[in-house]
Amino acid sequence: MGIINPKKMKAGGKVKAFKSHMMYDKKTGKGVKAPTMAKHLELKKKGYGHTKPKKMKAGGTVKDACYKKVKASYKVFPSAYASGAIAKCRKKGK
C-alpha cells in the first residue's frame, strides 16, 4: 500500500474515492463539472458550491412557509403588520 493523502481520509481512517460531480456558482447559478479533485478545490476557492441556487419566481417574490402562514393568519394581508410578521418568522427560522 502506498502513501495515502490525508485529504482523502474519512473520519474512520478509510480512503474515500473522488467522484466527478457538478459545482455551481452561488451568484450566477452557472454549473461546472469537477472531474478531478484539483478542479474541485480550484472551484471551491472561487466560491462554487455543491447545491444549485434556487431561482426566484416571476416578480422576485418567494412564497415560502412563513409567507403562507402569515397570509392565512392576517385578515388584511399586504400590511405593515404582516410584513413584520413574515420577517420575524424568517429570522426565527435561521
Image (cartoon, helix red, strand yellow):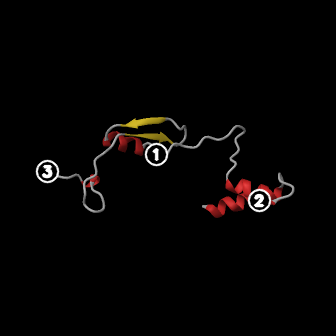
For badge 1, the amino acid type reads: Gly
Graded by Cα atoms within 10 Å as few (under 14), some (14 to 19) or many (20 or more), the crowding at tag 2 reads few
Circle 1/circle 2 CB separation < 8 Å:
no
Q: Nearer the viewer, residue 46 or 91?
A: 91
Label 2, on which residue? 84
Label 3, on which residue? 2
Q: Nearer the viewer, residue 69 or 86?
A: 69
Quarter occupied by residue 87: bottom right
Quadrant location of the C terminus in the rendered image: bottom right
State how far apart marks 1 and 2 are (Cα). Answer: 32 Å
Label 1, on which residue? 49
x, y (%) of residue 59? 72, 38
Q: Is residue 10 above or below residue 23?
A: below
For badge 3, the amino acid type reads: Gly
Circle 3/circle 2 CB separation < 8 Å:
no
Graded by Cα atoms within 10 Å as few (under 14), some (14 to 19) or many (20 or more), the crowding at tag 1 reads some
Identify which residue is drawn at 76% across, 59% down: 84
Q: Taking 16 as reference, is 74 left or right?
A: right
For badge 2, the amino acid type reads: Gly
